[in-house]
Amino acid sequence: MATTTLPPPRAASGPVARYVGPATVRGAQPTRSGDLTARLWSEDLTREHGFEPLEIEGAIPPELAGTLFRNGPGLYGHGAQRYQHPFEADGAVTAVRLGGGQVLGASQVTATAGLVEERAAGKILYGFSAPWWRRLRNMLGGRAKNPANTSVMIWQDRLFALVESSRPTELAQADLALHGVTDLGGVVRGAFSAHPHRVAARRATYNFGVVQGRKTELVMYELPDVGPARELGAVPLPGPTMLHDFIATERHLVFFLSPVRIDVPKVLLGLGTFETLFQWKPELGTEVIVVPIERPAEVVRFTTEAFYQWHFANAFERDGEIVVDYIRYPTFGSFGEIGRALRGGSGEILTAGRYHRATIDLRARSLRSEPRFDRGCEFATIAPGAEGREHGATYLVLGDLAAVGKLDARTGEVVSHELPATQRTTEPLFVPRPGATGDDDGHVLALQHDGPTNRAFLAIYDAARLPDGPVARAWFDHHVPITFHGTFARS
């Protein structure tokens, strides 16, 4: 593959940190301004385009052939009107296609029906950023917008943009063109989480949706590699709530239902702001819900101390217990931090979370949880194919989107590549080499952002030598807002 050397508008790599265990840290952890982070959470996508050549630094590994798809906010408002929270923003999918001697990039706002209507009107018509009278009218008429702004899923060679409040939105892999909203053959009732998890041993992907109404239900779905999707079962919940993610082993689905409750009167009357819809009630505790995949009616559930989590890394079963790796927060405060970033706030975001390993004893109906290391982190991922069984390496974002890290699950050692203070990273994804035999036998891909040039770039790391920094970068010529989650589809 051809290699082009670009002029150096930025530092080539950052310092390296290596540390072990929850208390021993070796290497600097630089303080850095929150301004670039805030821009990622508040500035619109500056240019939409289809696949076009990107500028390349370094040598693209020839075995990397496929497309990285990323999803996140694309538009934070219309004209002078801004959304109240990034989670209301209109989604945009950014993709990088590698192979055939080329690196091509595309970035497109997903033109859902609600967004098309708002663009024609030149103003916000949906959500809690719309005027009160319109919110009330939307509620009475059962009208809502699907922003499709959180994640992507590839199932049976179909690409979907996901948001936890709505049904999947199908896009064309070839050019990101909108196909439309789908219920996957009449299966999805309404909400469909942005966090599906595939279990390779079962040759199926699992997901859920929280159905709000007179009664609140957790509805679970199975999407087999071959054959139609189906509803796996439903679990009643104690009230309207936010449930962002879950995790799966080869035998069980695991949910941590934190004490976040939706203020129903405010929803019905269209009152307040997007953030004030959600109340943190720690006195309720966090409920652990475990559902056997083969016997979904035999649910085990119990309550433990209050905590919150946005994301899980993995879960597996060992010696009759379920082991769960996740990012744990003491409260729901990070939700407000994200909202303040859109409204011009500065400072670190998503740094209160700590990587925890929990052990669930189903017989005793108990959970014990311990931190693996003491540094803020988020967006943890593992090797595809390792989901649901014991894994060796976890890749994650460290600090204020400041570094790409790798945790050795067996030794507790963490190594990282610290980005320059003028750059930020998003979720790292591991792509194994063909015939890979280990959890770091491959490359790590992360969409990153450069402050001085206001450009996004794909960073490609050798997973076995992560602290050395990227072996190659592929540069867009424009800013891309933060992307939350993504996937890699091999050619």
Image: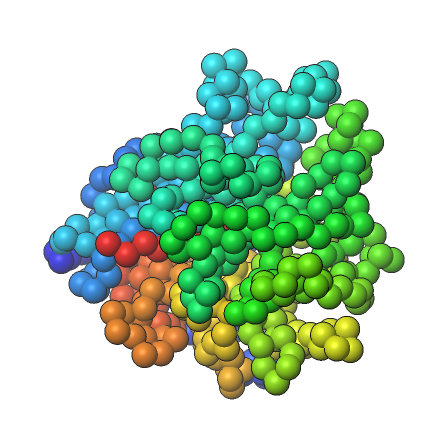
Residue sitting nearer the eye, 245 or 2: 245
51 on left or right of 487: left
Quarter of the figure with the C terminus: bottom left
Residue sitting nearer the eye, 398 or 312: 312
Judge whether 284 appears above or below 113 on screen.
below
Q: What colour scheme governs how the chains and residues are painted in the rendered image of this protein?
A: rainbow
Q: Residue furthest top?
A: 121
Question: Residue 109 location, x and y as percent?
Answer: 41, 33
Residue located at (48% from left, 23% from top) = 113
Judge whether 331 appears above or below 304 on screen.
above
Residue located at (50% from left, 43% from top) = 162
Judge whether 270 appears above or below 208 on screen.
above
Quarter of the figure with the N terminus: bottom left
Judge whether 221 appears above or below 26 on screen.
above
Count of residue discs: 0
Residue 348 visible at all: no
Question: Residue 215 location, x and y as percent?
Answer: 77, 41
Residue sitting nearer the eye, 247 or 348: 247
- Dividing the picture into quadrants, the one containing residue 85 is top right
Question: Residue 224 location, x and y as percent?
Answer: 44, 55
Residue located at (38% from left, 31% from top) = 179
Q: Residue furthest right?
A: 283
Residue 181 visible at all: yes
Residue located at (64% from left, 28% from top) = 127
218 on left or right of 471: right
- Dividing the picture into quadrants, the one containing residue 80 is top right
Question: Residue 55 location, x and y as percent?
Answer: 22, 48
